[in-house]
Image (tube, grey):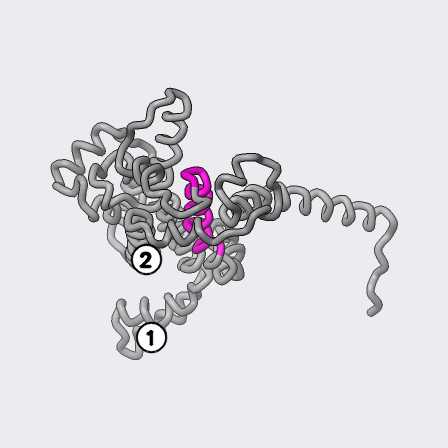
């Protein structure tokens, strides 16, 4: 069977489609390129403007200062460990919940699903959440960065729907051979569910890595700030000082201003450098999970 030749209308549509998608991609990519150029440029030279794609006065001093600063390095390590712990535990706990809900023999399954679904429609708000965390005694501790983000019912529904699509005969044959429910889950369900597991891991990992809200409102100790909260503090305090003309601030802002001992390093250049530092890990991880992403979302959420 020969390959059908594209008509002139098809070629025009494909050209237009690729042009629009390329334009959108460049629009999304340009801010990262701009920040990258500024992070490798001399800070005082960057204040002159005119830098768009490439650094004009190349320097590594911004990264040298960033990686040698204990506050920046500490916040980055907190985000790394937090993202790893939450992602692994959330995927595992969500998979266990979804597998239980996918079992048709589970007593009261419809009522349990309704309970989980109904409680996700309402939120107590910031103040009740703060009171709850205070009663649990996790305020201003590392646990407040981890425990609240381990559960998401939307992810459980995606996994449950994916598990429902796995042929029940595989599980039944394993049970006939004497396998327990945990063995069926670990040896049959999980290996067949890599697409949805990778998709949920991507959802959770990106969400945790970019979460600045928890550290902003539930953490007072700057030594426990994750990277996103640390960056948000730096930008907010710099903007406030620019508007008011004040020179005071927290230790974060004082760090940006008083420790610029290296030539060519400015607070603005350091902020651009930190943006690149906290963005790069997600950009590096995403391509490895991309091959599972579309399949996991489509199969997990649209199969039924």
Residue 12 is left or right of residue 18, and the answer is right
- Residue 183 at what x, y percent from top left? 28, 72
Q: Which residue is mark 1?
A: 174
Task: In the rendered view, tell whether residue 105 sits above or below residue 66.
Answer: below
Q: Position of residue 216 (x, y in %)?
A: 29, 36
Can residue 251 be seen in the rendering of this structure?
Answer: yes
* Residue 108 on image: x %, y %: 25, 49
Q: Residue furthest top?
A: 244
Q: What mark, if any, has residue 84 been given in the picture?
A: 2
Query: Residue at (53%, 55%) from the top-left corner?
Result: 294
Residue 236 in the magenta stretch? The answer is no
User: Residue 285 placed where, x, y %?
Assistant: 46, 59
Between 207 and 175, the one nearer to me in the picture: 207
Question: Relative to 29, is 188 above or below?
Answer: below
* C-beta proximity under 8 Å, tags 2 and 1: no
Magenta stretch, residue numbers: 266-283
Residue 235's quadrant in the figure? top left
Residue at x 37%, y 40% (from the top left corner):
231
């Amino acid at each position: 069977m020969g390959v059908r030749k594209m008509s002139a209308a098809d070629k025009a549509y494909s050209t237009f489609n690729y042009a629009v998608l390329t334009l959108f991609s460049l629009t999304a990519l340009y801010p990262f390129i701009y920040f990258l150029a500024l992070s490798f440029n001399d800070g005082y030279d960057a204040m002159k403007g005119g830098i768009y794609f490439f650094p004009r006065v190349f320097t590594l001093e911004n990264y040298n200062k960033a990686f040698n600063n204990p506050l920046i390095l500490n916040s980055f390590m907190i985000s790394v460990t937090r993202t790893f712990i939450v992602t692994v535990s959330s995927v595992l706990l969500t998979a266990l919940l979804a597998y239980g809900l996918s079992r048709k023999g589970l007593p009261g399954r419809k009522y349990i699903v309704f309970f989980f679904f109904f409680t996700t429609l309402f939120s107590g708000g910031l103040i009740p959440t703060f009171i709850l965390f205070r009663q649990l005694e996790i305020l201003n501790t590392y646990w407040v960065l981890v425990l609240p983000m381990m559960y998401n019912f939307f992810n459980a529904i995606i996994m449950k729907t994916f598990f429902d699509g796995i042929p029940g005969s595989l599980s039944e044959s394993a049970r006939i051979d004497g396998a327990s429910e945990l063995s069926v889950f670990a040896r049959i369900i999980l290996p067949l569910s890599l697409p949805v597991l990778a998709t949920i891991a991507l959802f959770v990992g990106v969400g945790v890595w970019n979460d600045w809200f928890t550290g902003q409102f539930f953490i007072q100790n700057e030594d426990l700030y994750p990277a996103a909260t640390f960056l948000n503090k730096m930008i907010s305090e710099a903007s406030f000082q620019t508007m008011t003309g004040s020179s005071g601030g927290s230790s974060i802002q004082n760090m940006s201003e008083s420790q610029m001992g290296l030539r060519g390093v400015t607070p603005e250049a350091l902020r651009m450098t930190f943006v690149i530092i906290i963005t790069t890990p997600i950009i590096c991880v995403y391509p490895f999970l991309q091959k599972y992403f579309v399949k996991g979302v489509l199969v997990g959420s649209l199969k039924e």
